[in-house]
Image (cartoon, rainbow, N blue to C red):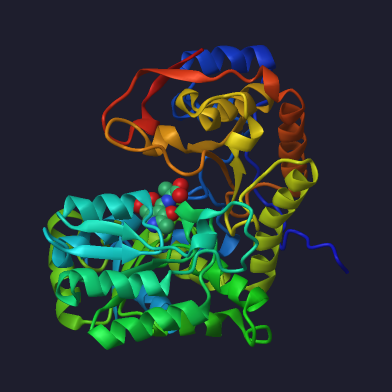
Amino acid sequence: MKTIIEPFRIKVVEPIRMTTPEYREAALRKASFNVFFLKSQDVLIDLLTDSGTGAMSSDQWAGVMRGDESYAGSPSFHRFRDRLREMTGFEHILPTHQGRASERLLFELIGGKGKVVPNNTHFDTTRANVEHSGAEAVDLVVPEGKDPRSRHPFKGNMNIDALRRLIERVGPERIPCVMCTVTNNSGGGQPVSLANLREIRAVCDKHGLPFVLDACRFAENAYFIKLREPGQQGRPVKDIVRDMFDLADGATISAKKDGLVNIGGVLLLRDEQLSRRAGDLLILTEGYVTYGGLAGRDLEAMAQGYEEVLQEDYLAYRIRCVEYIGEKLLAHGIQIVEPPGGHAIYIDAKAFCPHIQVEHFPAQALVCALYRHAGIRAVEIGSVMFGGEGHKPPAMELVRLAVPRRVYTQSHMDYVIEAIAEVYGKRREIRGLRIVRAPKVLRHFTACFEEV
Ligand code: F0G
């Protein structure tokens, strides 16, 4: 059979409240054309992020009930730790409340002024934590990773020559670690091959550098390796996952993605001393080392989530679901970042709205049009997010449709596809925006706009 079905039944439902175009028009104006200001009850299909928005399974909810809330030494922590040890082979495992907390601990310890951290592409919180420590964050993705039309199978790969040149230029003593983000969220959710990870490892070995994964979406990355990398087809995903982690000296993880939970994070380190120091910092601001700012029930849900995310029926459904949206949009002539990524589709807003100049934020204008037309909430990844004083406009103006895990069915996605195609049919009516008010940093969250 060709049809890939949702590999679950639905036991609990959450109603979606239908709204009219007039209602949404008023809501959008009240939100100053910034969808972060919308009330989520006013959104029909919420594709703002895939982070923390997934549905938990009945086994995860059973774990929530079983959660042991002891301050120290809870069996829920031991279940979480054992699951992560088994999956990743790492000995030293710290729970954190989410990915950026792991990043903060790591870069407080190894970052600092004068240091340089290479990555394929830093996610914005990773970059912010590197820079907050005083270090410089450098993105070294392969050139194909910046071309929306390139069909390269591993557009998240690190440019190895560029990595070598960077190490030569700044010197290995200034590089506290080499990072690689799997999948590469800021570059379209594109995967990194095992061969590329091995090459990074070899470069690190040559210069004695630690290699750290930003492993939020490692299971989706591993499934792409299975689908696309020569010699990997017959292998269980869990073995590929293990190969990925075996190459690394550390990993920062947001469990809100492939952990299939609403909150949680992990910091993995091979170095016992470093892990102990990270644990001391964890106690300072997050909580004791056996809960890291989470409840025991959250640790149970994570332990179970990391079991379920490796089920290959789940991953086949997950990757196909995102690919399906991408294929249909392309068939309607809508340009996206190709090939579809693991967790999201990125629409090329410059191609969608060629009549809107970059200074009038074509991607933000398209985000507003999608909400107005169909109650869909997407997010701008373009000049609003990365622009502003002293920044040059980014190479691409994108609208990200991030797909929450196990939440929407195929008919929800058919609705999204139909809505976007309809908006495309009347795209000349979309009007650009200008900023009325915005903060200096992370302005996309709170900027207010008006139509031009
Ligand atoms: N690294 C990557 C690659 C991410 O995508 C995120 C979060 C983080 C780190 C930080 O994790 O949110 O748990 O602190 N990405 C979300 C998104 C917010 O919408 O893409 P966090």
Q: Please, is residue 100 above or below residue 73 in the view?
A: above
Task: Say left or right for 425 vs 448.
Answer: right
Image quadrant where residue 352 sits: top right
| Residue occupying image coordinates x 35% and y 49% | 124
Residue 252, given in percent of the width and then of the height, sits at 33, 66
Instruction: Give the total of numbered labels.
Output: 0
Task: Say left or right for 108 vs 75.
Answer: left
Q: Nearer the viewer, residue 400 or 53?
A: 400
| Residue occupying image coordinates x 45% and y 30% | 36
Q: Please, is residue 43 above or below residue 332 in the view?
A: above
Residue 331, given in percent of the width and then of the height, sits at 80, 46
Q: Please, is residue 444 above or below residue 313 in the view?
A: above
Task: Say left or right for 121 vs 232.
Answer: left
In this orientation, does residue 87 appear? no
Residue 275, given in percent of the width and then of the height, sits at 20, 75
Q: Please, is residue 359 above or below residue 246 in the view?
A: above
Q: Nearer the viewer, residue 303 or 120?
A: 120
Q: Nearer the viewer, residue 90 or 191?
A: 191
Task: Say left or right for 428 vs 296.
Answer: right
| Residue occupying image coordinates x 47% and y 60% | 184
In this orientation, does residue 10 appear? yes
Quarter placement of the N terminus: bottom right
| Residue occupying image coordinates x 12% and y 66% | 280
Q: Nearer the viewer, residue 159 or 252?
A: 159
Residue 433, given in percent of the width and then of the height, sits at 49, 19
